């Protein structure tokens, strides 16, 4: 499993962070609701409370103390997580800890009963949940949505797909993000999850775009460097000779990061070679072109 070594945020730490920002009456209400959810276990009360949190608890952003060690969950500092979102994650975590056999399948079906905002919270913070590996199909189901915010919640700035999606699921997500013209730099684990089938699809898609006189996002090529066969090497030649400097740099980076001798040879006399030696650039720098 790709998540090996990624520790869980303890329920006590999660509760402490939440209750530090939560009014006393809201703390009492949430504790009472958890009792109704867990004793006896009730899916109806889980779904009802998950929805009610949006009305009972404010959506103010949370300031996380700098001294608090979040470990693998330090991404929360820059995520803009709100109080009601944290309350929802705490609610699900507490239920899953209390009775995983009962609540895992119930949480997995939240996608069927949640509104858009509720679903976005679930997907964006899946990595915080106990038994998170059980919710892969829920995340994959979200890839099929036509709602941009839902798709972005699982695909952008989220380590869940990198750690849990299989190759086909990962490729589906990456390609749809490209078709939707999203910022591909926000997808985590692109180099780690690169694979030969995806590289071939990227090449095929680029040829279709070129045939229709359409541009291809230079960042789209990022996964192909380890799979430069005869066809992709020709694609690199086209990128390196493009009038678009961002495309040139994309081709340069793919060839430089490749282990193919022919790819290295293509760079020897290229003008970018001297530029790179003086001031190295990376994929993020293509945005400035």
Image: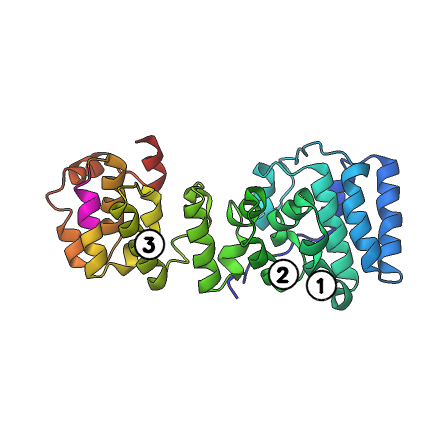
Please tell me which of labels 1 and 3 falls first in the chain. 1
- The number of discs equals 3
Secondary structure of residue under mark 1: helix
Q: Which residues are magenta?
A: 236-242
Residue 135: numbered disc:
2
Image coordinates of residue 287 in percent, x first then y, are 35, 34
Say if 49 sits above or below 278 in the image: below
Say if 27 sits above or below 143 in the image: above
Q: 135 or 86, which lies in front?
A: 135
Q: Is residue 7 magenta?
A: no
Q: Which residue is mark 1?
A: 104
Report whether residue 249 is seen: yes
Residue 202: numbered disc:
3
Secondary structure of residue under mark 2: helix
Please tell me which of labels 1 and 2 falls first in the chain. 1
x 52%, y 52%: residue: 159
Neighbor class of circle 3 (other Cα within 10 Å; few <14, some 14-19, many 20+) is many
Neighbor class of circle 1 (other Cα within 10 Å; few <14, some 14-19, many 20+) is some
Image coordinates of residue 118 in percent, x first then y, are 69, 45
Image coordinates of residue 96 in percent, x first then y, are 74, 60
């Amino acid at each position: 499993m790709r998540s090996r070594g990624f520790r869980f945020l303890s329920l006590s730490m999660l509760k402490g962070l939440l209750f530090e920002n939560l009014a006393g009456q809201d703390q009492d209400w949430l504790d009472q609701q958890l009792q109704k959810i867990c004793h006896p276990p009730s899916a109806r009360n889980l779904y009802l409370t998950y929805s009610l949190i949006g009305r009972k608890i404010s959506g103010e952003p949370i300031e996380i103390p700098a001294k608090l060690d979040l470990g693998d969950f330090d991404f929360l500092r820059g995520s803009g997580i709100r109080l009601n979102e944290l309350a929802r994650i705490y609610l699900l975590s507490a239920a899953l800890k209390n009775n995983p056999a009962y609540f895992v399948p119930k949480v997995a079906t939240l996608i069927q009963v949640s509104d858009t905002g509720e679903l976005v919270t679930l997907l964006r913070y899946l990595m915080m949940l106990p038994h998170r590996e059980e919710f892969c199909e829920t995340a994959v189901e979200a890839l099929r949505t036509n709602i941009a915010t839902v798709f972005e919640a699982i695909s952008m700035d989220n380590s869940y797909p990198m750690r849990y999606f299989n190759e086909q699921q990962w490729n589906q997500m990456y390609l749809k993000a490209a078709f939707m013209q999203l910022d591909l730099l926000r997808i985590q684990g692109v180099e780690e999850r690169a694979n030969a089938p995806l590289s071939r699809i990227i090449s095929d898609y680029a040829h279709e775009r070129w045939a229709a006189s359409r541009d291809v996002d230079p960042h789209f090529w990022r996964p192909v460097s380890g799979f430069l066969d005869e066809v992709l090497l020709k694609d690199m030649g086209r990128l390196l000779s493009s009038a678009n400097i961002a495309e040139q740099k994309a081709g340069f980076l793919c060839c430089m990061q490749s282990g193919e001798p022919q790819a290295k040879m293509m760079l020897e006399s290229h003008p970018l070679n001297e530029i790179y030696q003086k001031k190295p650039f990376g994929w993020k720098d293509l945005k400035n072109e």
